Amino acid sequence: MSSVTTHNSPSTGAVPEGMPDRKPSFLDRIPGFARPTDRFVTGWAIALLVSNIGIVATGGAVRLTKSGLGCPTWPRCTAESVVPHAELGIHGVIEFGNRMLTWVLTVIAIATVIAIWRRRPIVRFDRRLSVLLALGIPFQGVIGGITVLTDLNPWVVALHFLLSMALVSGATWLVYRLRHPHEQSDVSPGLPTRLGRDLSWFVYAMTWAATYLGTVVTGSGPHAGDEDAPRNGLDPANATQLHADAVFILLGAAIALVIGTRAARLRQFRTTLVFLGLLLSQGLIGAIQYATDLPIALVIAHMTGSALLVTGATWLVISFSRGSHETEL
């Protein structure tokens, strides 16, 4: 259960008689931040989630246009300049532009933190989660810098992508909590719900396994981010087969969860159905891109789909972990 602290001050914000009026702060003058509503706070959390998914797509565009070393060093673009110069061409512009998006993401994260901290009643867990996500963004930026300093080492690139997925999962968790503030865990769920909860955690774990193996496939394939970037040395066909095996296990678990939630009339049925739809779409994109020699547009779509799939898996497992009461469809 989340720790919630309420205050006994009048909801009208009236100042007690005999006390001087409090001068409005800078934040009090910004629309929405004076007294953040649930809708306002949730809107910022959704913006944080969407921007974390979006930067996955733009990061993919950097790699797929061979702009990963468009700025050959970090934190500067070159040893002499923070910004790219003409000699770096379009690759420098693309890489530098993606770096600047990190600052946009940071602003959104800070706004989300401020909105949650000024919301009443206080929910300490939401505060901590928002701060953790905000701190994760500059940390992710540092890992991105290390990928440049290691000349796009495929294992570091994989870590960079997986950290993005972790931020997406955390932002999804925050959005769910804000959209369902009064939903609590069922301490004694029925057998169908317990089985569904266990299977949802398996689905979540297999989503991560498939995502990780996808980064291994990427590290063995042609889209390195730069013509001279190293590869991980694994056979692409074997890596792809291992990734596909994990996806098929995930697909079987997702289908079982859909059938089980439908048969038991659990309220999570629609959520499991949406996740299955995301998984099938992602699998279709992956199969087509493999059969068509990895065209750039499909690879970016597949990367974005990975973020959406992690979002769906996170939403699914939380829906079973909080408020797991059985209801009629």
Image (tube, grey):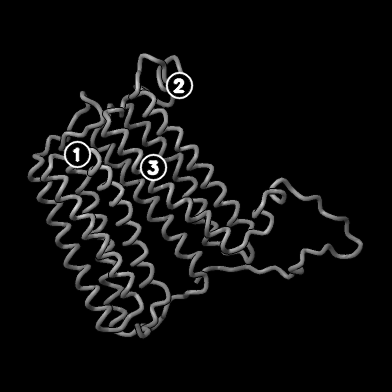
Find the residue positioned furthest to the right: 18
Q: Measure how far apart labels 2 and 3 are at the Cα level.
A: 20 Å
Q: Secondary structure at mark 1?
A: loop
Quarter that holds the C terminus:
bottom left
CA neighbours of label 1 inside 10 A, class few (<14), some (14 to 19), many (20+): some
Q: Which residue is mark 3?
A: 55
Tell me which label, 2 or 3, sits earlier in the chain.
Answer: 3
Which percent across, then down, holds residue 189?
36, 83
Q: Which residue is mark 1?
A: 295
Looking at the rendered structure, the kind of residue marked 1 is Pro
Q: Quadrant of residue 225?
A: top left
Q: How many marks?
A: 3
Q: Quadrant of residue 169?
A: bottom left
Which residue appears at 14% of the width and 50% of the height?
287
Q: Which residue is mark 2?
A: 83
CA neighbours of label 3 inside 10 A, class few (<14), some (14 to 19), many (20+): some
Which percent across, then down, holds residue 49?
43, 52
Looking at the rendered structure, the kind of residue marked 3 is Ile
Which residue appears at 36% of the width and 83% of the height?
326
Tell me which label, 1 or 3, sits earlier in the chain.
Answer: 3
Q: Nearer the viewer, residue 122 or 32?
A: 32
Residue 168 showing in the rendered view: yes
Q: Measure how far apart labels 2 and 1 are at the Cα level.
A: 30 Å
Vertically, is 180 above or below 74?
below
